[in-house]
Amino acid sequence: MPTPRQVAHAEAHARILEAGRRQLAEHGADGLSLRAVARDVGMVSSAVYRYVASRDDLLTALIIEAYDAVGSAVETAAAARTTPGRRFVRAAHAIRDWGRDHPHEYALLYGTPVPGYEAPESTIAPAARVPATLATLVAAAEAAGTLDPPAPSRIPRDLAGQLRSTVGQLGLNLSPAAMLALLHGWSAIYGFVSFELTGQLKGTFDPADAAAAYEFGAIARTVGFTDA
Amino acid sequence: MPTPRQVAHAEAHARILEAGRRQLAEHGADGLSLRAVARDVGMVSSAVYRYVASRDDLLTALIIEAYDAVGSAVETAAAARTTPGRRFVRAAHAIRDWGRDHPHEYALLYGTPVPGYEAPESTIAPAARVPATLATLVAAAEAAGTLDPPAPSRIPRDLAGQLRSTVGQLGLNLSPAAMLALLHGWSAIYGFVSFELTGQLKGTFDPADAAAAYEFGAIARTVGFTDA
DNA sequence: CACAAGTGAGAGCACTGCTCTTGATTTGCT
DNA sequence: AGCAAATCAAGAGCAGTGCTCTCACTTGTG
């Protein structure tokens, strides 16, 4: 059973995390200062070091939270009861929607790495949820016979090895061609969403909703979904 | 004629820019501190403000330099004497190569916007060089009859307007389908390169050369180049 | 030669992450 | 109940940041 002191400690820790979350959402990763968090929870800066080892430590906790948030959003979208192709498009929209709702968190996960910050081991599992979800959809389509990925001409030996190893990591039944198509699809979705969120589309496709809807469909087609 | 004082001023300004460039390349945008620049050129920090209005001002100058650097690298690659499709692939490789050689500058241009920094007007023209170059290649292919972009099913009215307006900004002869394909191609290239540079490929396609070569070819094909 | 402009240095403000010490409080065991 | 140990919040302090302001000095020009 937890002692009262442990309870208080956990509560203080939670309050610090929450303040960090709020500050991250409002001011971004660079604005996440331990001193401001301390002010927010009514402590002096040195006191928060009782609960959090460092600024990076807090950042890591928030990164994991964010990975889980976007991961579960995408998984929910991908669980719709329709064809794999349509679920792929829905998943893409879920990524975009989450990113638009949480731009700073998106930047933290998928943007420029924070200088001096090295992502610890504990982040790689939650980070894999989104691409893993997309992979299951490709695999589902391939199993259902509704995937017609562009036939790769000739695959160099080292690339073939990477494809095999990655498919193995995913633990799915994916042909090399499908794996290549998945890589293309994921990076294309990532490219479009990051494009929009970093403001590169400003002045051309500014309200990017229509462009996104079209683009995600196009991506699904280039991946090879015949049921999108 | 420039007075000696003006010459000295310009030289000091140049030395500051150079120090900033060096520091940006080594420590990234966040490590770019005016105080370190001052130390580097042998001044005290306050003296730098005689030559540079603020840190953001220095950053803007470096951003413009970087846009011009990548822009000219891509333009050179796109000027090869071969088919538009192959030039498109070369241009993609040029973007990737430049990014790998200048990761911090790439992050500055295409990564997460620096918090609190608002890109001034003067950056938009050099920023447009890369997409404009890609656009000329698509237009060249379309003019040569070697472009077969995926036929867009139905384009919503607002997207059609954005397509027209963007084509107009580019000042090129591009069909709506080609413009859509260009958007797809540019964001896919951007996605893959950013993917690699932000370390998302680590553990799967880590030496990404083979994957990049394959992917850029695939992108060229999905854009519709029949001569790649 | 005198005067104004340009220049560099220094002090200082408010902020950051982080460490260490100090004193108070709470906990758990005898 | 008493007491030692663990825990806690606070403060001072270090090194760093961007930026402002003042002061002395040099330089070019009328």
Image (tube, coloured by chain):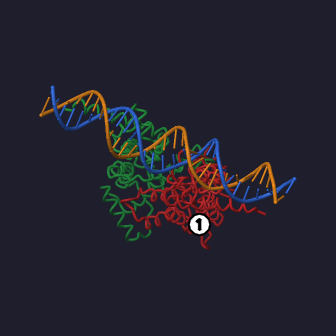
Chain colours: A red, B green, C blue, D orange
Q: Residue B202: x percent and y percent?
A: 60, 47
Residue B64 visible here: no
Q: Is residue B160 left or right of residue A115?
A: left
Q: Callout 1: few (<14), some (14-19), or many (20+) C-alpha neighbours within 10 Å?
A: some
- Chain letter behind tag 1: A
Vertically, is B64 above or below B191? above
Image coordinates of residue A74 in percent, x first then y, are 59, 65
Q: In which quadrant is the N terminus of chain A drawn?
A: bottom right
Please tell me which residue lies in front, B137 or B41.
B41
Q: Identify the amino acid type marked 1.
A: Ala
One can see residue B147 in this view: yes
Residue at 45% in and 62% down = B150
Badge count = 1
* Residue B187 in the image: above or below residue D27: below
Residue B125, image x and y in percent? 33, 50
Front residue of A182 and B127: B127
**Screen quadrant of the C terminus of chain A:** bottom right
Tell which of A31 and B210 is nearer to you: A31
Element marked by disc 1: helix
Q: Hey, which residue is sitting farthest bottom in the picture?
A: A81
Q: Residue at x 31, y 57 (%)?
A: B169
- Residue underneath mark 1: A73
Quadrant of res A210: bottom left
Which corner quadrant of the image does residue B177 belong to?
bottom left
Q: In the figure, B200 relative to A72: above or below?
A: above
Q: Position of residue B219 (x, y in %)?
A: 49, 53
